[in-house]
Image (cartoon, grey):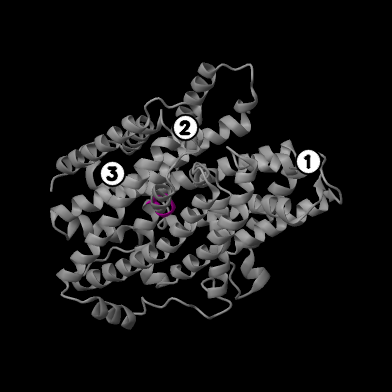
Amino acid sequence: MTPLLLFVFVVAYFLVLLLVAWYTGRNSNNESFFIGNRNSNWMLVAFGMIGTSLSGVTFVSVPGAVSRDSFSYFQITLGYLIGYSVIAYVLLPLYYKLQLTSIYHFLSTRLGVVSYKTGASFFILSRTLGATARLYLVVKILQDAILENLGIPFWVTTFIILAMIILYTYQGGVKTIVWTDTLQTTCMLAGLIICVVYILNTMHLSIGQSITEMGEKGYTKIFFTEPDSKLFYWKQIIAGAFISITMTGMDQEMMQKNISVKKLGNSQKNVMTMATVMLFVILLFLFLGGLLYLFAGQQHIVATGDKLFPTIALGYMPPFVGVIFIIALISALFPSADGAITALTASFCIDILSMNNRGDWSEHKKKTTRHIVHLSFATLFLLFVVIYKWVNNPSMIGVILKVAAYTYGPLLGLFAFSILTKRAVADKLVPIACIASPVICYLLDNFQKKLFGSFEIGLELLVINGFLTFVGLLIISKRQLLSNQG
């Protein structure tokens, strides 16, 4: 199949998204953009959030890492289940009680305005770095598979993708994203299943036979019991729990969809449904990874890591499967990128500009400001994606989890301190504590061999970061309640 024909399918898929966006974005206002009028269907939110949680990185990097890490990623997913339970029964009741539009406003009611701005700033930093890393991976695949052959430069490809995203989120925001995420998750999961079935049929293997062959090559190992290893199961499970708590429960992008559901009970059902489905979806991605490496061995394909799935789908499968792969990949891309830009816009407008507290601003001025911020973040995304191309890291999922460890750690410490203690902090000193902990973690991470010998720090770096922030907040606090605590 020619690159031009593949591009036609991409454009057709985008037009479908644009139609959905037009239909759902009619008569939208700032309340629709930021919080979906608090009237989203919980089942749609739960299903759509699967796509947002997975992204194009999961679609490509998780299968690609199977030859190196086997099925160890499933350990992290088990931790997710614990973390989502904390979100559903600890964080969500708090957010609903306070009727929050931005979840970081909780930090203002508990610790102070500077703490609030600090938490929002760390979210903006983390989500910008993480979302652009996800975006880069998919743009690079589309560039190599389609647009390079049409003579279109990489930065133009990125610009086109971002322009598409802006077009269908510009007006409706969360109200639109709830519906487009549902469509995109459907396409992504359908593509995953079709690719699995095709490879099984091509290799004339049953599910049982394929698992046996994977086991012989060591791909199916889930639990790693060596305590010094970064893949040690307790490290992975605990890290997975805290990753989900921070990257979902303390993330404005993810939580703005949850709190757009009218009732707390339905929002809790949304989170726990998503957590359960995710277990099976991740297991299917790992199974696909094992199949891809079996197929690569049979066909003498040398590609590994992030390049394996695209190489096989676009070079060794029939054209219709290649189209399905591209559509599924885009479907994995858009939920993570569109939601990120929308959430970053919401957080910057509400948390940094304090738009909701500006009674002297007209609705028109608020909407104009929101549009300017929206376009500004899209421009920032373009810049960071180009930077990632210069860096050219072989496995983007490692980059994303490392970024999360450094940038979500302070959020974990801030929220944990606010919920678990009754102490008041010296609000103006909070940024120092939140910046110091990632710096210490960077030193620990880079000098761990000298400090700890054979012991490896893995994803638990996020927990260490949060703990150091918590300790820092304790140091600058005193035993009394803030007078404005809610």
Q: Main secondary structure of the magenta part?
A: helix
Q: Residues within 10 Å of mark 1 (few under 14, many from 20)?
A: some
Label 2 Cα neighbours within 10 Å, binned few <14 / some 14-19 / many ≥20: many
- Toward which corner of the image does residue 213 lie, by quadrant? bottom left
Q: Earlier in the sequence, mark 2 or mark 1?
A: 2
Q: Is residue 240 above or below residue 485?
A: below
Name the residue tied to disc 2: 33
Residue 206 falls in image quadrant: bottom left
Q: Nearer the viewer, mark 3 or mark 2?
A: 2
Q: Position of residue 7 (x, y in %)?
A: 20, 40
The answer to whether residue 49 is left or right of residue 240 is left
User: What residue did someone put label 1 on?
Assistant: 427
**Label 1, label 3: how many angstroms apart (C-alpha)?**
47 Å
The first of marks 1 and 3 along the sequence is 3
Q: Secondary structure at mark 3?
A: helix
Q: What range is drawn magenta here?
A: 51-55
Task: Give me the residue at 51% from left, 72% from top.
Answer: 231
Query: Which residue type carries mark 3?
Result: Gln
- Residue 207 place in picture, x, y as percent: 25, 76
Q: At label 1, which amino acid type do we have?
A: Asp
- Say above or below: 373 vs 473: above
- The location of residue 354, given as percent across then percent down, is 63, 28
